Image (tube, rainbow, N blue to C red):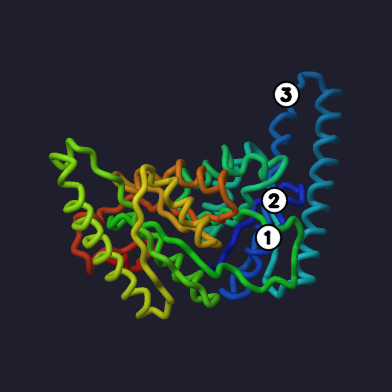
Amino acid sequence: MYKKIMVPTDGSGFDREAIRVALRIAERSHAAVRLVRVNPTGTLFGMETSPEAASVSARVLRQERDRILGELDNLAAECRKISEARISTALEEGPVPDALCTYASRNKIDLIVISSHGRGGITRLSFGSVTDSLIRHTSIPVLVIKPHASYLNPGTGELFKRIIVPLDGSSLAEQILPDVMALAKMDETRLTLLTVLLPRTSSQDGSAAQKAPWRDKDVAASQAYLYRTAAHLRENGCLTTTHVVFGESVAQAIADYASEVRADLVAIATHGRSGISRALRGSVADVVTRTGTTSMLVFRPIRVLTEELPADMRRRPDGIPVIA
């Protein structure tokens, strides 16, 4: 499914787990890996008015660019020692989020893999301006890795053994499923489709005495929906289970469940108008990242008229059917 995988890197060393995961995915999907670094200092030069100052600035800029290119070449050589994936490097200039989004769009990247943990540069900001910008300004899936290690580990062969997929019944939320299936088929991965039900208030159900009936009805409806979706995934060779939980907060309930079952990945679609698809955009990603060690696959679908289409006609912009 993936042909080109981009890994933003800042040279700090805290991006190594993201690189390791990208290499594993690339090996199993026969994809190429692009290690991309952004030099934001390039935009700061050329502001001096005197010829002498401009000459010094240009020389310093060339030296910095050569240094970064050398680090990128060394990183690529290190990756080639442990992986058979095709690896290339690129050095871009400008504001980091903008440069990465532009590169990904220009080069038709299929998957972005980025570390969510670190102490500086991209890794420090990954769930701030950089990753948030990538998610909001591209329709490319972003795999946000919560590192368990800081260095390339050639001995680690597994990717994600348990993936949690929150669903709310909307076609937009379901657009994450093709990417989840692609990852699941790379390993013996167990998928858990999860729906979070929020307690109704007394004004919504009429009285406190009616809480049990609505609870039973909503659970039954959610389970029926999850069973239908799971059946389709099983037909496509994915080991799939379902679960319904209650919580005061959708984000916290997903984070707690992922931690409870020791999930390796939470896969969510962030774009929508209601339910989880509205709530997930920042809160779930932020809660899961801050409170646990769970990595996340985040996808912002291109807005398409799927809600009004018959179930068998719903498709992603790339032509892959959406599961009804």
Q: What's the residue type where badge 1 is placed? A: Ile
Q: CA distance from mark 2 to mark 1?
A: 8 Å
Classed neighbour count for the residue bearing mark 3: other residues with Cα under 10 Å, few (<14), some (14–19), many (≥20): few
Q: Are marks 2 and 3 in contact (CB under 8 Å)?
A: no
What residue would you read off at disc 2? 9
- Location of the C terminus by quadrant is bottom left
Q: Secondary structure at mark 1?
A: helix
What residue would you read off at disc 1? 19
Earlier sequence position, callout 2 versus callout 3:
2
Of the two numbered discs 2 and 3 in the rendering, the one whose residue sits closer to the viewer: 2
Question: In terms of image quadrants, where is residue 95?
Answer: top right
Of the two numbered discs 3 and 1 in the rendering, the one whose residue sits closer to the viewer: 1
Residue 297, horizontal then vertical, whole percent: 50, 57
What residue would you read off at disc 3? 47
Q: Are marks 2 and 1 in contact (CB under 8 Å)?
A: yes
Which of these two is toward me, 238 or 9? 238
Q: Is residue 98 above or below residue 214?
A: above
Residue 255, horizontal then vertical, whole percent: 48, 50
Q: Is residue 158 above or below residue 307?
A: below
Q: Secondary structure at mark 3?
A: loop
Task: Specify whether 160 is left or right of 315.
Answer: right
Classed neighbour count for the residue bearing mark 2: other residues with Cα under 10 Å, few (<14), some (14–19), many (≥20): many
Earlier sequence position, callout 2 versus callout 1:
2
Q: CA distance from mark 3 to mark 1?
A: 35 Å
Q: What's the residue type where badge 2 is placed? A: Thr
Q: Secondary structure at mark 2?
A: loop
Question: In terms of image quadrants, where is residue 174?
Answer: bottom left
Which of these two is toward me, 143 or 190? 190
Q: Is residue 84 above or below residue 208?
A: below
Earlier sequence position, callout 3 versus callout 1:
1
